[in-house]
């Protein structure tokens, strides 16, 4: 994958309709997506050479997303704030240029607002996967 501009990573929230309509969470200056897979260790006294043994495909997969920036769009602000206070799962779309698109259910697990007296109001959010994610590779 060639170098990409960080600004091209897109985070969008679905409205829960069928079909799903997505609104980009505008104003994000920093975004991070972390994919995790826990392993299941089945090492025992008779493991060959006493090497650790892991069960293939048995671990717990999860994804975490963080973002920080300034809200520049009332629609996205209202949606994110609403799903946080209601603790409602929503479908989120994560677009990573030249890599692909991940989509699935997430909960907003943290929402922080901050601001300096001589600057703009800012926010940060954290998402935790709340179901299976789909992945479509970039073409």
Image (tube, rainbow, N blue to C red):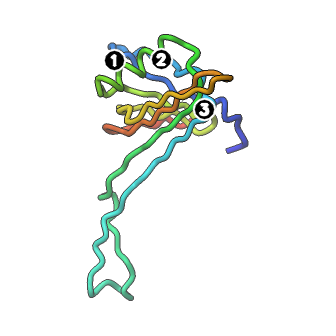
Distance of label 3 from label 2 (alpha carbons):
18 Å
**Based on the displayed image, in which of its 4 quarters is residue 103 positioned?**
top left
User: Residue 77 bears which disc, if any?
Assistant: 2
User: Taking 21 as reference, is 125 above or below it?
Assistant: below
Q: Which residue is mark 3?
A: 9
Left or right: 84 as drawn, with respect to 64? left
Name which residue lies at 51% across and 41% down. Answer: 33
For mark 1, what is the residue?
A: 16
The quadrant in which the N terminus is found is top right
Counting from the top left corner in percent of width and height, residue 53 is at 35, 74
Q: In the rendered view, tell whether residue 104 sits above or below residue 80.
A: below
Is 33 placed left or right of 79 in the picture?
Answer: right
Left or right for 95, reference 22? right
Q: Mark 3 or mark 2: name the one nearer the start of the chain.
A: 3
Residue found at the very far front of the displayed protein: 117
Describe the element under mark 1 as helix, strand or loop. Answer: loop
* Position in image of residue 90 (x %, y %): 35, 25
Q: Residue at x 39, y 55 (%)?
A: 37
Q: CA distance from mark 3 to mark 1?
A: 22 Å
Residue toward you, 96 or 76: 76
């Amino acid at each position: 994958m060639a170098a990409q501009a960080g600004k091209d990573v897109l985070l969008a929230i679905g409205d829960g309709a069928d079909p799903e309509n997505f609104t980009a969470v505008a104003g994000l200056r920093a975004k991070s997506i972390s994919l995790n897979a826990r392993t299941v260790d089945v090492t025992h006294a008779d493991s060959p050479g006493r090497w650790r043994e892991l069960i293939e495909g048995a671990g717990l997969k999860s994804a975490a997303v963080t973002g920080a920036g300034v809200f520049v769009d009332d629609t996205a602000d209202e949606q994110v704030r609403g799903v946080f206070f209601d603790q409602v799962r929503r479908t989120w779309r994560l677009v990573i240029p030249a890599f692909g698109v991940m989509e699935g259910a997430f909960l907003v697990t943290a929402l922080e607002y901050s601001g300096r007296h001589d600057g703009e109001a800012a926010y940060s959010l954290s998402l935790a996967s709340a179901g299976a994610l789909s992945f479509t590779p970039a073409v």
